[in-house]
Amino acid sequence: MEYILMNESHITPIAQLEKQCFSDPWSEASIGSELRNPLSLWVVAMDEDRLAGYVGSQTVLGWADMMNLAVAPEYRRQGIGEALVDQLVFRLQKNDVSCLTLEVRQSNAPAISLYTKKGFVQVGRRPNYYHNPKEDALILRKELTV
Ligand SMILES: CC(C)(COP(=O)(O)OP(=O)(O)OC[C@H]1O[C@@H](n2cnc3c(N)ncnc32)[C@H](O)[C@@H]1OP(=O)(O)O)[C@@H](O)C(=O)NCCC(=O)NCCS
């Protein structure tokens, strides 16, 4: 598995995986605009020419927000989600980012388990943040300073 920065060739497969994983998927246009956003950092996991997963972030004033994380169903439970978080954290630390936050559906046990394993802690809750179905978001944070 190779972990590299997102480029133009990854936009369509990322959009397809978004549709598979989320009820409010990002469009190809939104994903493509991230490539031109200097605040954005996206990492993809590639199995030769197949997209296995991706993670996307934006950083403002040293605080990063993880906006998307997904692993294709056939690649799950192989450590790829964890490796994507590690890759993102490593790259953000090199950019002097001090903390990483994210929102997650309160019912998303696999993702919450992954984030807890990677050292994220709950710092808040956004009531009814998600739609289709309506659900609270938990706000998780990880300090990146060593
Ligand atoms: C959440 C997701 C990214 C995990 O990816 P993954 O590659 O399967 O995760 P990993 O194999 O790296 O697992 C790492 C840890 O995550 C947790 N985990 C992953 N899948 C899990 C599951 N189905 N049930 C419980 N815990 C799970 C475990 O703690 C696991 O550690 P362990 O193997 O020591 O038990 C993946 O299930 C996914 O893409 N889900 C749909 C999209 C999504 O919900 N994204 C997160 C939005 S906030």
Image (spheres, rainbow, N blue to C red):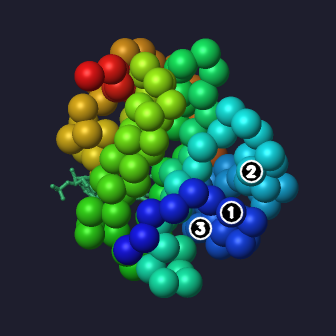
Tell which circle, 2 or 1, labels the residue nearer the N-terminal end. Answer: 1
Depth order, front residue of 111/63: 63
Indicate whether 62 appears above or below 106.
above
Q: Is residue 7 visible from the viewing direction of this image?
A: yes
What's the residue type where badge 3 is placed? Leu
Q: Name the residue tied to disc 2.
A: 35
Q: Which residue is the site of mark 1?
A: 7
Residue with the mark numbered 3:
17
Q: Position of residue 65 (x, y in %)?
A: 54, 30
Residue lying farthest left? 117
The C terminus sits in image quarter? top left
Residue at mark 1 to residue at mark 3: CA–CA distance:
16 Å
Q: Identify the image quadrant of the N terminus.
A: bottom left
Please, what is the three-letter code of the amino acid marked with disc 2? Leu
Image spot of residue 141 (x, y percent): 38, 24
Locate residue 90, reporting x and y percent. 38, 41
